[in-house]
Image: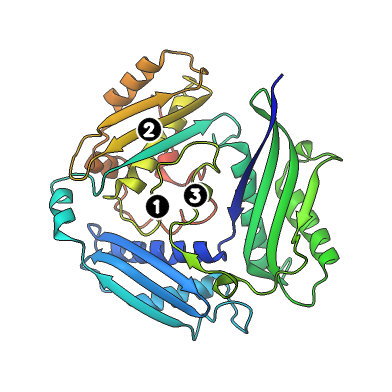
Amino acid sequence: MKKYLFTSESVTEGHPDKLCDLISDTILDKCLEQDQYSRVAIETFASNDKITIAGQLNTNAQLDIEKIAREVLKGIGYRGKGIDIDAENCKIDINITKQSSDIAQGVDVGGAGDQGIMFGYANCDTDEYMPFAIAIAHKLAKRLTEVRKKGILPYLGPDGKTQVTVEYEDDKPKRIETILISNQHDEDVSLEQLKKDIIEKVVKEVVDEKYLDENTKYFVNPTGRFVIGGPLGDTGLTGRKIIVDTYGGYARHGGGAFSGKDATKVDRSAAYMLRHIAKNVVANGYAKKCEIQVSYGIGLKEPISIYVNTFGTNTIPEEEIEKKIKDKFDLTPDGIIKYLGLRQPIYAKTTNYGHFGKDDLPWEKVIEL
């Protein structure tokens, strides 16, 4: 009987990196609302009381980018007051150019917007076919935001992180070994009260008690204090939470970030498509675990390679699974965009708590494969 521990983390929407991801994805959505053929590659940087928005943008949309950024800050719940960023008065710098014509000439004819490798993954750990540790970490992070915004724990701030260590037995999650939560809070709240409230109102509300036992360890704000948060406490940058966004480190990652990129960027669209395919390989009973890799070349339509790995859990030969994939799906950039409907303004809702495992996203649909 093989036993091991595996850990994944998540972050709240007020984490400085996720603030940047959400600004970039909201700008993308605002472009697509007016012009579905917008080309968008927007990066956001946040530090102290300043937001910098830069990148490339080809669109017919009319945008007030500063207003969009401030609305995102307000929506997250940043309060200023010397403890995080001031949504009303922070400085916002904008440095946006058009997409390079050298890149555009390859994308215009339906080719990939860049070279690269992408992965998709699914397994049987959870009902949503996601690895268990990242699924729980996301639920905890989402609950932290929920109890703050609903006034259940009104002393919490927007910035927070979760981390979950799971004990596996024969590759199946058996119990939770450790839960670590750090969340920004008001200065007058004691650590004892914070720990008690988070265990009762956050952990026990989202984690099935069968995975918790007398040996489960809880760490809440282990430094003892977390009053200063957001970009005032740490810099934020688009695309720095790629493991949080995908599978919590349980599966491989090609290295390309998602947020702020339109669907002609296969870093994003192909990763979504591969998640869809891997999930359906598992959901259709062809394997208990499935990881798929593809590679693309800039300006080329067809993938350069496709690789399927079921880690010995397959019920039919992997070569047959690969054939089903090639017969069923058009993996050109245009084919992916059309199949998943990726010219719609759906991206801001992907930003937080993982891009996978959410029922309302098109790549999560279960089909007959």
- Image: 29 above or below 254: below
From the viewer's side, name the closer residue of 280 and 90: 90
Instruction: Find out whether the residues at labels 3 and 1 contact each other: C-beta distance under 8 Å.
Output: yes
Q: Amino acid at mark 3?
A: Asp
Quadrant of res 271 = top left
Residue toward you, 173 or 233: 233
Sort mark 1 into few (<14), some (14-19) or many (20+) by Cα contacts within 10 Å: many
How is the model colour-coded? Answer: rainbow
Q: Which mark is residue 297?
A: none
Is residue 63 something that shows in the picture? no
Percent x, y for residue 76? 55, 69
Decide: is 115 above or below 291: below
Residue 145 sits in which quadrant?
A: bottom right
Residue 220 placement: quadrant = bottom right
Q: Label 3, on which residue?
A: 245
Amino acid type of the residue that numbered disc 2 sits on in the rendered structure? Gln
Q: Nearer the viewer, residue 357 or 322?
A: 322
**Residue pointed to by mark 2:** 293
The residue at which mark 1 appears reads as: 258
Residue at image coords 63%, 58%: 161
Q: CA distance from mark 1 to mark 2?
A: 16 Å
Q: What secondary structure is found at the residue carrying circle 2?
A: strand
Q: Is residue 335 left or right of residue 194?
A: left
